[in-house]
Image (cartoon, grey):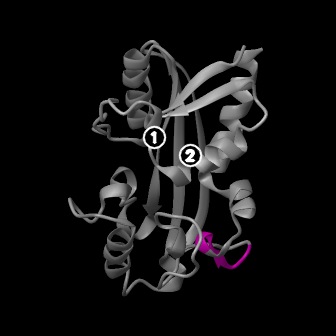
Amino acid sequence: MKRIIVIGSRNVNKLREIRQILAGLPVELRTLRDYPDAPEVEETGGTFEENAIKKATELADVFGEWVMADDSGLEVEALGGRPGVLSARYAGPDQNDARNMAKLLAEMKSVPENQRAARFRCVIALAALGKLLFTAQGECSGRLAFEPRGRNGFGYDPIFLYPEFGKTFAELDASVKNQVSHRARALQEFRRKLESYLA
């Protein structure tokens, strides 16, 4: 029998990545789209790990199923780690991907290329009935471009340059990005830990 795991997200791009990397495991993946009355969990933690654990444990209590939840974002060295846990809502109440990127690029406008180091970080938590089972983490280092490039991906992908390929995440094919991204690395660790749990 397959183990039900609820993915604590409605983000279709994120769901696609998770399904690709966890393919072949004896699990039935559901999402918050399968639970229209699911509560919104406020991300009040000061770290990605705190937010991921909070979402996973609170939703596991609600559903009575295993829940995996993640928190991720971009940390820019020249800005002391901002936007960090505020990545998804960096531009304020009327945020969207374009506005978040525009705000970040405006703040970094006068910063030279050799000082534009940035990294994506992701923490995934798995919980069951309010109890944390484990967390997995991944990160990917690069630098900020001066303007958006590429049409793939989401979030800050168009302005995150991956040095090894000299391209932004939005210029990479999904199959390539899903081997090197912060979420891919966290999911690969998550998959290894989940396999031992399921065994």
Are the two marked residues, 1 and 2, in contact with CB atoms closer than 8 angstroms? Answer: yes
Checking the image for residue 9, the label placed there is: 1
Residue depicted at 47% across the width and 85% down the height: 147
Location of residue 78 (image quadrant):
bottom left
Q: Is residue 151 above or below residue 73?
A: below
Q: Residue 32: image x %, image y %? A: 44, 35
168 is within the stretch colored magenta: yes
Residue depicted at 22% across the width and 64% down the height: 94
Location of residue 130 (image quadrant):
top left
Residue depicted at 30% across the width and 57% down the height: 89
Q: Secondary structure at mark 2?
A: helix
Q: Is residue 87 above or below residue 191?
A: below
Q: Nearer the viewer, residue 75 or 134?
A: 134
Label 2 is placed on what type of residue? Leu
Spatial CA span between label 1 and label 2: 7 Å
Q: Is residue 136 visible to us here?
A: yes
Checking the image for residue 15, the label placed there is: 2
Residue depicted at 74% across the width and 55% down the height: 179
Label 1 is placed on what type of residue? Ser
Q: Is residue 8 visible to us here?
A: no
Which span is picked out in magenta?
165-170
Q: Nearer the viewer, residue 141 or 183?
A: 183
Q: Is residue 176 above or below residue 186?
A: below
Q: Is residue 92 above or below residue 161?
A: above
Q: Residues within 10 Å of mark 1 (few under 14, many from 20)?
A: some
Q: Which mark is first along the chain, 2 or 1?
A: 1
Q: Secondary structure at mark 1?
A: loop
Q: Residue 162: image x %, image y %? A: 64, 70
Q: Residue 111: image x %, image y %? A: 41, 83
